[in-house]
Image (spheres, coloured by chain):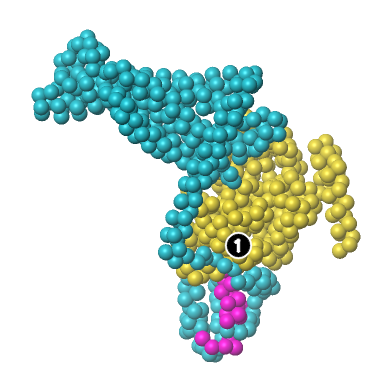
Amino acid sequence: MAVIATADPIISVRGLKTAFGEQVVHEGLDLDVRTGEILGVVGGSGTGKSVLMRAIIGLQTPVAGEITVFGEPMIGRDEEEAKNVRRRWGVLFQGSALFSTLTVAENVQVPIREYFPGIGQQLLDEIAAYKISMTGLPANAGNKYPSELSGGMKKRAGVARALALDPDLLFLDEPTAGLDPVGAAGFDELIGELRDALGLTVFLITHDLDTLYAICDRVAVLADRKVIAVGTIPELLALDHPWIQEYFKGPRGRVAAAVSERERSGA
Amino acid sequence: MSAPPDLNPSGDDPGVIRLEGALTMLRARRLEEQLGAVTGDNLTVDLSGVERMDTVGAWLVHKLVRDHGATLVGATEEQKTLIEHVARADKPVTVRREPEPLVYQFVGQVGEASMMALTTLVGLLGFFGSLCISISHIFRHPRRFRFNAVVQQFDMVGVHALGIIGLMSFLVGIVIAQQGAVQLRQFGAEVYTVNLVGRAAMRELGVLMTAIMVAGRSGSAFAAQLGSMKLNEEIDAMRIIGVSPMEALVFPRVLATLLMMPLLGFYAAILAIVGGGLFCWASLDLAPITFVQRIRDVIPMTDLWQTLIKAPTFGVIIAMAGCFQGLSVEGNAEAVGLRTTTAVVQGIFLVIVLDAFFAVFFTQIGWP
């Protein structure tokens, strides 16, 4: 499935305000995520990247503002109705959040059992098996417990669970944090592949410049309690916001840009 | 070579399976049943009527191709990509754990539990040894004694426990007096309720209930504190800086519990006696002044000595079990919870075993 960058947004956030007690995290935040794109969300520590994601997926109730996902308003929704929207997205949390008492295969089967209780064990096992190998886990990973997996494998297992219900939308919270460069590059590749094959839209929070250059179609920059800019990396570079300049043109940004440039000219 | 009738509505060619509508997880159960009835080879699968397909639908189609050598016609580009993607993911993956035979499981569990008990015992012994070494270090270098840490633990282990231990002992005193009075009334010996309350509280219950409460409050807190410090690599950081965790963390806790337990135990015994006294006053019309006089007569001094000998011993055991389990935490946060539970169970178990030994011992040396 090719990238369908249609204009209508799959997620639309308007005038979002979130706060923890006195401390305001976002104020007047607007953001659109287009269908079929991989949107990278960057920002300094404490700018509320994860809080934004939690607000969109309904784990954090905003003080004010509107959030629509798949064209349906998400704030103040009845829990039962929200469930129907919720099964159309998958989430990979920062620490993978695999259920530690279940094996990887059982973890993948949890959402399917929850929403489609009628599916037989045989088919459940087959689904778990292909999801597991789709995310690049080795063949013997299915019956392992999360504590027996390495960090990179846990992330892949987390993606397998997030993809269990064939979502249209995938949320990833710092997927490459804590992975070695080889593992991180492999993970980037996986996300790109899955997006192409399954026609996913990906909302990706990251600190990893390599990930941004490798797979993100657009990048949203969070600062000063709002999204200060959204666009492709060249578009962002054209802006002269000090944080953006420092982020992309700092020592790490230059290296990542050089690598991405070399790969593009080589390919 | 035939397709089930509901998958071939027009019935023109039995070798053609026509799939229509949405091939998604929602229909997976029925589809699986229908496709399970498909027999024969060289089928043709017509996907031209398919509106939506997810990976489950693609997987079922892929299985037709894999198991029946079916040919696909009428698939869109997107559907082809999806089926190809799923086909590439079709690798043998182990999904279930083979359960071991029951006999093996049983033998394995017994062996594991025995090894566990043995290693814990040896570990506790080693822990006690290294605590002794630390104490001798502190004696030789008194400046290493952390006065503030000990006082802080006094506060946590002792002062903060006063309320709950006092209330608990008071209520236990009332219950013993009440139950005792009911039983003794049958012999017309109600007046001996005083003996019962006084001796039970001073000799056994005060210190035992206190030990159980301290194990639940402080032993668990020690295990959880040290356990999360271990996980957070704080213990390693201390070692690298040259601070001995034994001296800085374990010794203050053990010392504080050792010193606080006799005080708490005596306090608990007194409050149990007060509770019993109030009951006697209210229910048996025994004036408080008489009660106090009787108490002084019936409780021998050796009962107090017993409490004052047992309490610090129990304190050391509880604190050591807590700290030992805390420092044994490895891996993840779940281990902290497990170790905390173990610390409390182990602490209480050892206290009760030791209490039995003490009871026999004190009787043997002729204490009434």
The quadrant of the picture occupied by the C terminus of chain B is top left
Residue B171 in view, yes or no: no
Q: Chain of mark 1?
A: A
Question: Residue A55's x, y, as percent?
Answer: 60, 43
Q: Is residue B110 above or below residue B89?
A: above
Q: Is residue A112 above or below residue B313?
A: below
Q: Please state which of residues B98 and A261 is positioned toward the viewer in this rendering.
A: B98
Taking the spot 53% from the left edge, 34% from the top edge, the residue there is: B128
Q: Is residue B150 magenta?
A: no
Left of B275 or right of it: where is B107? right
Taking the spot 44% from the left edge, 55% from the top edge, the residue there is: B110
Residue B215 in view, yes or no: yes
Q: Which chain is yellow?
A: A
Q: Amino acid at mark 1?
A: Ala
Q: Secondary structure at mark 1?
A: helix
Question: Residue A12's x, y, as percent?
Answer: 64, 48
Question: Residue A20's x, y, as percent?
Answer: 59, 32
According to the picture, the residue beneath numbered tag 1 turns out to be A141
Q: Colour of chain B?
A: cyan
Taking the spot 71% from the left edge, 63% from the top edge, the residue there is: A193
Question: Residue A247's x, y, as percent?
Answer: 81, 41
Q: Please state which of residues A81 and B340 is positioned toward the viewer in this rendering.
A: B340
Left of B146 or right of it: where is B299? left
Q: Please state which of residues B79 and B358 is positioned toward the viewer in this rendering.
A: B358
Which region is colored magenta? B39-67
Q: Please state which of residues A6 and A145 is positioned toward the viewer in this rendering.
A: A145
Number of residues whose C-alpha sits closer than 10 Å to that of mark 1, classed few (under 14), some (14–19) or many (20 or more): many
